[in-house]
Amino acid sequence: MQRRVFSHWLASAVPLAGLTHGGLLHAQTALKEGSDFVRLSKPVAVDTGAGQIEVLEFFAYSCIHCYRFEPLFAAWKARQPSKVQARRVPVAFSDAFVPMQQLYYALESLNLLDRLHEKVFQAIHVDKQRLTTTPAILDWVKQQGVDMTTFNAAYNGFGVAAKVRRATQLQNVYQVEGTPSLGIAGRFYAPGQGPRTLVVADTLIAQLR
């Protein structure tokens, strides 16, 4: 989803694509700087230890392309060695995205991502629920059987607010213009290219090693 058309999903539904992991096998691994990836002019500070490679997936729950990409990224993340630390970063192309950022980090803080992360995508893109406002989000979370006192404390807490600020900062320093996309090792930015995005990541990681 491009920054300038972030609200397009509200106006029309896009059919789901049948992306499979097998598609990665046919992608070319010869990368072209400037199109496959961008080398950052100024390195970004990473949150990983020495000898580790940080990979950030910039995403938005409201992005249909992120919904399609999610199972690919999850499978890719699961098979990475310990030296590769991959995590998701919810973006905010406008203030309208902030409740979705809070939702992600509240679920993370309560160890509910494994149970509800994919369900958020499904609620938006399959069930057509517009989980972009706090009331809509709280109503949906309650329907999932989550203790609302605990969730509200996390959703409105300082910890989540700090992570939201950090996510937006990372988005800005990586100059993210669309989702899903990847930030790699504080040095590279890979714009979304469907399954090929992960081939770009694998190639850059191999070079860094």
Image (cartoon, grey):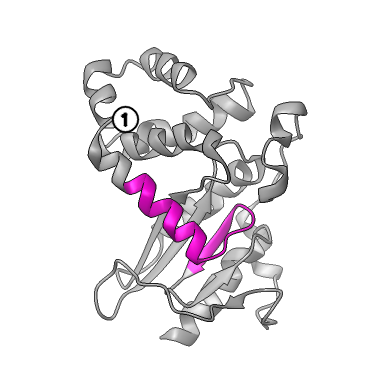
- Residue 136 to residue 103: above or below: above
Which residue is drawn at the image coordinates 54% and 27% (left, top)? Answer: 132
Residue 104 relative to residue 146: left or right: right
Q: Dot 1 lies on which element?
A: helix
Amino acid at dot 1: Tyr
Q: Position of residue 182 (x, y in %)?
A: 53, 63
Taking the view exactly as shown, the residue that stands out farthest to the front is: 95
Circle 1 residues within 10 Å: few <14, some 14–19, many ≥20: many
The residue pinned by badge 1 equals 155
Q: Is residue 95 magenta?
A: no
**Which quarter of the figure is the C terminus placed in?**
bottom left
Q: Which region shows up in magenta?
A: 163-183
Which residue is drawn at the image coordinates 48% and 54% (left, top)? Answer: 75
* Picture quadrant of residue 24: bottom right
Q: Position of residue 200 (x, y in %)?
A: 59, 72
Which residue is drawn at the image coordinates 49% and 57% (left, top)? Answer: 171
Q: Position of residue 27 (x, y in %)?
A: 70, 71
Depth check, front residue: 135 or 82: 135
